[in-house]
Image: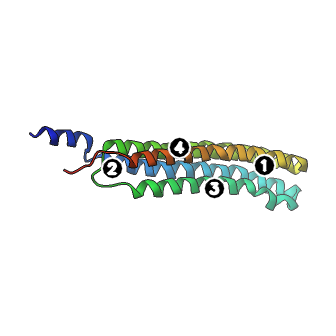
Amino acid sequence: MDPALLAQMDRCPMYASFFGAFGCVCSIVFTTFGAAYGTAKSSGAIFSAGIFRPDMVMQNTLCAIMAQILSIYGLVASVIISGDIKEKMPIHTGFLQLGAGLAVGLCGMAAGFAIGIVGDAGVRASAQQPRLYTGMVLILIFAEVLGLYGVIVSILMITRSKGDVTVCKY
């Protein structure tokens, strides 16, 4: 068999696109899971605190909104990754796409957990002492930025995967 063909088959296996597709799935699934947890955990506190302070219900929905932003991060990464998946692609590209999806997905899930826990405690505390609201918002921003770090790393990895010099012919 031709040595060039063997080298090409080694760098461009037929299953390389699976890793890109799996990265796409990980991106949206994990960020959505984090967003769902953050929304569910903070929403319980929003409604509980709303019994005592109905005037703060709309103000406290910031927790749920910030949790939902995480799923947008995953959606953006998934769309970018899926746009680069091809039938014949280098394994290197598939691995980078998988890494990009895992980076944004797992960071988004961790951020969703943090937003849910901070939102739960913060909403209950700010219902009793309204001056704590500003501190809660600041901590929510710190939790949200964890997901943003994942998006930045994901975009860097996706950009790097496009600069591959291997061309799959066979």
Distance between the alpha carbons at the discs numbered 1 and 3: 15 Å
Mark positioned earlier in the residue sequence (2 or 3): 2
Distance between the alpha carbons at the discs numbered 2 and 3: 28 Å
Q: Is residue 26 visible?
A: yes
Which residue corresponds to mark 4? 153
Which residue corresponds to mark 1? 137
Which residue corresponds to mark 3? 69
Q: Nearer the viewer, mark 4 or mark 2?
A: 4
Secondary structure beneath label 4: helix
Mark positioned earlier in the residue sequence (4 or 2): 2
Q: Quadrant of the N terminus?
A: top left
Which residue corresponds to mark 2? 17
Secondary structure beneath label 3: helix
Residue 163: percent from the left, percent from the top? 38, 47
Residue 65 placement: quadrant: bottom right
Secondary structure beneath label 1: helix
